[in-house]
Image: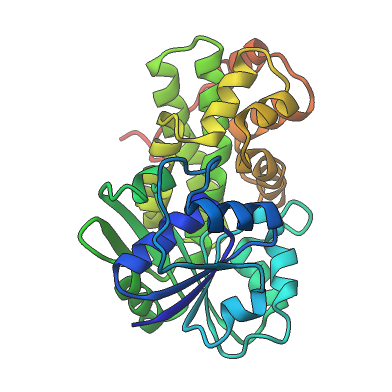
Amino acid sequence: MARVGILGAGAWAIALAMVLERNGHEVKMWTCVEQEADMLLRDREHKTSLPGVKIPENIQIGMDIRQTVKDCDLVVFAVASRFTRETAKRLTGMLKDQKIMNVSKGIEEDSLLTMTDIINEILPGNDVAVLSGPSHAEEVARRMPTAVVVGAETKETAVYIQELFMNDVFRVYTSPDIKGIELGGSLKNVIALAAGVADGAGCGDNTKAALITRGIAEISRLGIKMGCHEQTFSGLTGIGDLIVTCASMHSRNRRAGILIGQGKTMEEAMEEVHAVVEGVYSAKAGAQLAKKYQVSMPIVKQVNAVLFEHKEIKQALQELMMRKKRDEIAEQWD
């Protein structure tokens, strides 16, 4: 039995806590929101983020972060990406030679750091890994078969986390490509916003298929330029996560995109979704990374224009369709 402290108490944190609890591990969850803690302790259910799913009594819930991580074998960062830095700072001086795993998806806009980069910067000397993949919390919590990938610096750490989480409905693969896993998991949210906008604007399945395939091409180009493994982007945290996020109504990013496609502003869409829309925060970072590494990412560019420059959706789609002609495969004709 392992002792695991989970930082965050949203849907994904709860779903992972339930996986671990079913596997026989001791699990503690932390939230800094008093109203949320009261609700979870009183109802054993997150009424807004994960309604209808009861949290087992064995899972401890509290607001003392020191007690949550004390003597833990693994600390899991499951807060929204924009709170990762703040949460890591709370742990200063509490962890030493600890295994830490990030499960949030995002890129910090100002620094262009991934979440594991931030954790390593603030909490140096710990063993930091990442878990990601096509894994809606609503389905994981209800024991629907799911596959994810864990990335770590060493095979030993990856296998350790794999063994903690894996069971008959939650399959875990391992990978050394931490950066590629995080990049795919973050930028797919931007493409999912585009897919949602297209849905809301009345486009069809052809449009979505084009956005998914050309979206993964953009993400792959950037990832390879940044030193990531090409195979990562054809795997679970690449095309796998992209498909599920672009196609499912569980996806906050797709739902927000649909509302924007129907004429709502970015702010109105985020308010109506009632959840963190990570793609909005990753869109600017994606565009900045494209510029930094001199990589063409036209879909990401147009998403930024629609979100932050009030560009007409029809115009953005037309510009994507009427770009300069090019080959799909870079190889030359015989």
Residue drawn at (67%, 85%) of the image: 94
Residue 273 visible in image? yes
- Horizontal relation, residue 58 to residue 317: left or right: left
Q: Residue furthest left?
A: 168
In the image, 206 versus 329, the foreground residue is 206
Front residue of this view, candidates 281 and 295? 281
The structure's colour scheme is: rainbow
Q: Is residue 224 visible?
A: no
Quadrant where the C terminus sits is: top left
Q: Quadrant of residue 147?
A: bottom left
How far across and how far down the image is residue 254, in percent?
Answer: 52, 30
Residue 23 in percent (x, y) is at: 29, 70
**Residue placed at 69% from the left, 30% from the top?**
271
Q: Residue 63 at x, y = what percent?
A: 66, 68
Query: 327 or 17: which is nearer to us?
Result: 17
Residue 84 quadrant: bottom right
Q: Residue furthest front?
A: 42
Q: Residue at x 46, y 40 (%)?
A: 51
* Front position in the image: 20 or 116: 20
Above-or-below relation of 306 to 34: above
Is 108 above or below relative to 306? below
Dividing the image into 4 quarters, which one contains the N terminus?
A: bottom left
Q: Judge left or right: residue 110 versus residue 321.
A: right
Query: Residue 35 at what x, y percent from top left?
Result: 68, 52
Residue found at x 53% / y 63%: 179
Total count of labels: 0
In the picture, residue 158 is in which quadrant? bottom left
Q: Is residue 208 left or right of residue 305?
A: left
**91 versus 268 height, above or below:** below
